[in-house]
Each structure stands twice: as structure tokens, then as C-alpha cells.
Image: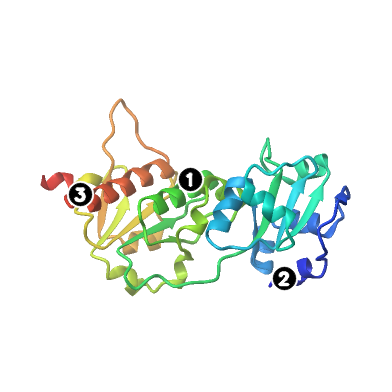
């Protein structure tokens, strides 16, 4: 069920165009730009047709959809959703809608969605990604997207990291939030992670290369921030440090790129059944 602040103002879809920034739904969307409001209401915002389509594919029903006055649905599915009475739809005038969005050129549609229910690390997880102090939303979104694409079983978000439901993270992740479990790291017992044979930490100056590890074993990949690296918890979990060899005087890659490179090496090994080092 939608939270009270949406349900209380639910009404049939109409042609009314909202122009007041004091409107309850407008205030809600604006408030959800803050982490505290997301946590208190159990909701977050997804902008754009692709994000909403990914949510619908995952069986997530928006609490409310907000469209710009001139919006025309780009797919039959969204058109049917907006024309029906399954979801509360609000239409905003152009200036108010554009002011509400964080993107420079908004697509004219956004949704208020429920935060995923808390879950546990799957018992049969063989690839877990631990994001330790990832503060940049773009890096966080990239790592979530790459984790889902590479077949990771879950992503753990450690303390000091940006909120994975930050609007910039959601946009960068391109639907990954609906494709992979995202858990707070402190909800998973350390012993559960320590039971994984490979617990690798990405370090620029490590002696072991990322493609010299047998990733076919159950593994934990720990990725820290580019600026300071992983924190104490990530370092305490690790039993192996890995590096990505680089040339031309390049010292490091950002966390999103580095983590993605390692993730797709893991996926490659598991797909063909052999690490490069053992060929």
C-alpha cells in the first residue's frame, strides 16, 4: 500500500495541471532528494522512461507517477499505464516539472517507488561485491550496474558510502536496483563473508594481478574509494590484494572503472571455466 502521504491525496486521474510548488506530491518528490526522507517514507524517485520500465519489469508498482504537461509516452506500455487507473498519475506544468528534476534535459516522467524490502545475503552466493567508502554517485551507479551485469549475487554497501538510492546513483545504475540485491554491509555477519575463500581487495600497488586469481571459487570483491581506498572493515575482510596493470604513466583508475574490469574478468573465467593465468 502507498504511504499515508500519497494515499491520503489519491484521486482519479484528471486533466488538472499542477502549477503550485506547495502541492503535496511536488513537496514529496522534492523531499525524497534527501536520504533522511527516503529512509523515513520508504520511497525513492526514479526519473525517465527506462528507469520506470525496469521497475515495471521487476514487478515494482509506483506509488505515484508524475508527468510534465507536454509528456507523450514513448512506449505502449507506459501509455496504457498512464491511461489506466492502476497508478496515481499527476501532471505538472513544464516549468515546475523541470525544476523538480535533477537532470538537465528531463524526459518528462518520473515515479515515486517503494524502497526494496530488506533482504538477506543469499545462502548460495558465490560472488559478493563490497563497496567500502564509495562516495561518488557515478562510481556507485557504475559498480551496481556492472555487478548486476557480471552476475554478482549481491552488493553490500559499507559505511561511508553514498546512499545507493541517491538520484544520481539511480540514474547511473540504469536499472540495476531492480536486478540485484543491495544490502547494508552491517546487516551481514562478518563470519558469513569470511567463509568465502577469495576475499580480494583492489589496491593500485598490489603485487598480484587481477587476472592471476582463480575467481571460479566463491569470492568477495572489495572496492574502496579512489581517494583513500577501502576502510578498516574492508581491509579486515581481505585475504588477498589485487592490482590492474597499467602503462603510459597512468597511476590509477576511478573506482567504477577498476571494479568493473575485475568483475568482468570474474564473469569471463566463470563463463569459460578457466583463469587466464592457468591457461
Are the residues tagged 1 and 3 within 8 Å (C-beta)?
A: no
Q: Mark 2 points at which residue?
A: 3
Q: For this view, does 18 lie left or right of residue 159? A: right
* SS assignment at label 2: loop
Q: Name the residue under label 1.
A: 139
Could you give the CA–CA distance between mark 1 and mark 3, rounded to whole angstroms? Answer: 28 Å
Viewer can see residue 137: yes
Location of residue 42 in the rendering, given as x and y in whole percent from the top left corner: 65, 67
Could you give the CA–CA distance between mark 2 and mark 3, rounded to whole angstroms? Answer: 47 Å
If you read the primary sequence from the N terminus, does the residue marked by circle 1 or circle 3 appear first? 1
Q: Mark 3 points at which residue?
A: 272
In depth, the one of 266 and 211 nearer the eye is 266
Task: Classify mark 2: residues with Cα within 10 Å, few (<14), some (14-19) or many (20+).
Answer: few
Location of residue 232 in the rendering, given as x and y in whole percent from the top left corner: 39, 61
* SS assignment at label 1: helix
Q: Which quarter of the rendering shows the N terminus?
A: bottom right
Amino acid at each position: 500500500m502507498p504511504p499515508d502521504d500519497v494515499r491520503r491525496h489519491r484521486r482519479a486521474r484528471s486533466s488538472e495541471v499542477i502549477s503550485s510548488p506547495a502541492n503535496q506530491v511536488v513537496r514529496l518528490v522534492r523531499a525524497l532528494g534527501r536520504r533522511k526522507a527516503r529512509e523515513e517514507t520508504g520511497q525513492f524517485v526514479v526519473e525517465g522512461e527506462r528507469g520506470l520500465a525496469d521497475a515495471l519489469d521487476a514487478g515494482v508498482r509506483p506509488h505515484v507517477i508524475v508527468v510534465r504537461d507536454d509528456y507523450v509516452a514513448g512506449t505502449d506500455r507506459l501509455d496504457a499505464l498512464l491511461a489506466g487507473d492502476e497508478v496515481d498519475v499527476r501532471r505538472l506544468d513544464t516549468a515546475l516539472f523541470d525544476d523538480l528534476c535533477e537532470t538537465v534535459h528531463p524526459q518528462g516522467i518520473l515515479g515515486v517507488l517503494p524502497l526494496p524490502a530488506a533482504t538477506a545475503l543469499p545462502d548460495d552466493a558465490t560472488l559478493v561485491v563490497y563497496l567500502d567508502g564509495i562516495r561518488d554517485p557515478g562510481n556507485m551507479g557504475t559498480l551496481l550496474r556492472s555487478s548486476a551485469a557480471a552476475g554478482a549475487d549481491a552488493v553490500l554497501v559499507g559505511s561511508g558510502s553514498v546512499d545507493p538510492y541517491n538520484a544520481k546513483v539511480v540514474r547511473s545504475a540504469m536499472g540495476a536496483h531492480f536486478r540485484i540485491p543491495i544490502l547494508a554491509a552491517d546487516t551481514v555477519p562478518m563470519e558469513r563473508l569470511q567463509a568465502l575463500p577469495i576475499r580480494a581487495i583492489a589496491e593500485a600497488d598490489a603485487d598480484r594481478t587481477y587476472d592471476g586469481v582463480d575467481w571460479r571459487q566463491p569470492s568477495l570483491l572489495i572496492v574502496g574509494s579512489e581517494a583513500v581506498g577501502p576502510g578498516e572493515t574492508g581491509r579486515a575482510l581481505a585475504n588477498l590484494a589485487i592490482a590492474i596493470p597499467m602503462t603510459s604513466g597512468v597511476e590509477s583508475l576511478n573506482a567504477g572503472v577498476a571494479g568493473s574490469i575485475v568483475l568482468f574478468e570474474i564473469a569471463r573465467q566463470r563463463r569459460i571455466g578457466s583463469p587466464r593465468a592457468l591457461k
